[in-house]
Image (tube, rainbow, N blue to C red):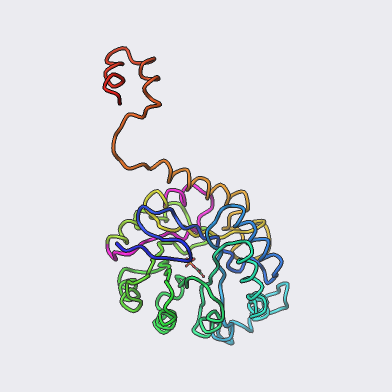
């Protein structure tokens, strides 16, 4: 299986997991909050931060936009959706901040105009949200950028994923297994789909986690996920639809630490006696304690 290069990192089997802190819309339209979240991701040791970009009038119908919904930006759903979008100057500031603090950044564009928008920035990849996996025109537009693609497969059947993979092609493609419920229930995470999908498509497969807690995302990495994406927030109690299923600063730090510890622990699978075990063996073993030591093991 060919690895996929994103920024300075290779993603693929046996390589360190690429850890993405999904800021998504958890910045609540506030650039300072976005920068604080980027700093949280850097402090935790994440490889990348990710945003979501939408052209509100394209992604949502007029009916959805005019629906009443009291929110910090106004009284309708449209006020909220527009309030959550950053403009080009905001993203320019995000780009320069990420460069300064040395972290990759990219976005999931939810419509073709948002790909045109993102092309003003030198991001190392595009993400396809699970909701967009069946949008062939968007997939083709993203593919035309020539950048690596990370495509999420929540809510999708194998037929739909097969089709998306045909549209995208397998070059520079990473697929993400995910369950698109917020928060996702443990019994519906189906982590074994990660190796199954890698075998079926022959491309690196990662995991986009929407569960609460940390251990199952670590398990995904141990099962071979080439990247792990989790939402981050400063405080799960903040307003916003994705906050509750997100990791707080302490949680994302522990996730990165635990994935790195598990990576160190996986080894090469060859059973061996470590030098450091010999004195322990000599002390504790009643029979055959010296054979290995004498053989110079
Ligand atoms: C919703 C997104 O991704 P996922 O389907 O992995 O949750 C996204 O990246 O915008």
Q: Please give the range of residues in magenta.
A: 200-220
* Residue drawn at x 47%, y 52% as measured from the top left: 217
Q: Position of residue 141 (x, y in %)?
A: 43, 83
- Does residue 171 lie above or below 48 as drawn? below
- Does residue 110 lie above or below 218 as drawn? below
The question of residue 83 being in magenta is answered with no
Q: Position of residue 181 (x, y in %)?
A: 49, 62
Quadrant of the image occupied by residue 28: bottom right
The question of residue 215 being in magenta is answered with yes
Figure quadrant of the C terminus:
top left
Q: Is residue 289 left or right of residue 112?
A: left
Q: Is residue 208 left or right of residue 277?
A: right
The one of 162 and 180 positioned closer to us in this rendering:
162
The one of 43 and 107 positioned closer to us in this rendering:
43
Q: Position of residue 184 (x, y in %)?
A: 49, 57
Quadrant of the image occupied by residue 114: bottom right
* Residue drawn at x 43%, y 46% as measured from the top left: 263
Q: Is residue 270 left or right of residue 181?
A: left
Figure quadrant of the N terminus:
bottom left
- Does residue 74 lie above or below 201 as drawn? below
* Residue drawn at x 69%, y 70% as measured from the top left: 31
Q: Position of residue 237 (x, y in %)?
A: 67, 57
Quadrant of the image occupied by residue 51: bottom right
- Does residue 181 lie above or below 222 as drawn? below
């Amino acid at each position: 299986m060919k690895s996929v290069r994103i920024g300075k990192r290779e993603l693929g089997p046996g390589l360190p997991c690429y850890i993405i802190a999904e800021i998504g819309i958890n910045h609540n339209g506030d650039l300072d909050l976005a920068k604080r979240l980027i700093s949280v991701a850097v402090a935790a040791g994440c490889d990348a931060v990710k945003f979501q970009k939408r052209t509100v009038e394209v992604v949502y119908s007029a009916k959805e936009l005019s629906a009443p919904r009291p929110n910090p930006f106004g009284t309708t759903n449209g006020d909220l959706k527009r309030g959550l979008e950053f403009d080009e100057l905001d993203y320019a500031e995000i780009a320069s901040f990420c460069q300064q603090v040395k972290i990759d950044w990219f976005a999931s564009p939810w419509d073709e105009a948002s790909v045109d928008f993102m092309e003003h920035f030198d991001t190392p990849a595009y993400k396809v949200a699970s909701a967009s996996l069946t949008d062939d025109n968007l997939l083709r537009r993203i593919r035309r950028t020539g950048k690596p693609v990370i495509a999420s497969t929540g809510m999708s059947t194998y037929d739909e994923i097969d089709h998306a993979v045909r549209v995208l092609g397998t070059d520079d493609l990473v697929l993400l297994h995910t369950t698109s419920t917020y928060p996702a229930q443990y019994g519906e995470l189906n982590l074994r789909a990660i190796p199954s999908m890698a075998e079926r498509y022959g491309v690196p497969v990662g995991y986009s986690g929407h569960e609460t807690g940390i251990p199952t995302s670590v398990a995904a990495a141990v099962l071979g996920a080439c990247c792990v994406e989790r939402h981050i927030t400063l405080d799960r109690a903040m307003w916003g639809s994705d906050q509750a299923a997100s990791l707080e600063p302490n949680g994302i730090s522990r996730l990165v630490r635990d994935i790195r510890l598990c990576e160190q622990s996986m080894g090469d699978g060859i059973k061996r006696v470590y030098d450091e075990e010999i004195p322990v063996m000599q002390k504790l073993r009643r029979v055959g304690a010296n054979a290995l030591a004498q053989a110079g093991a």
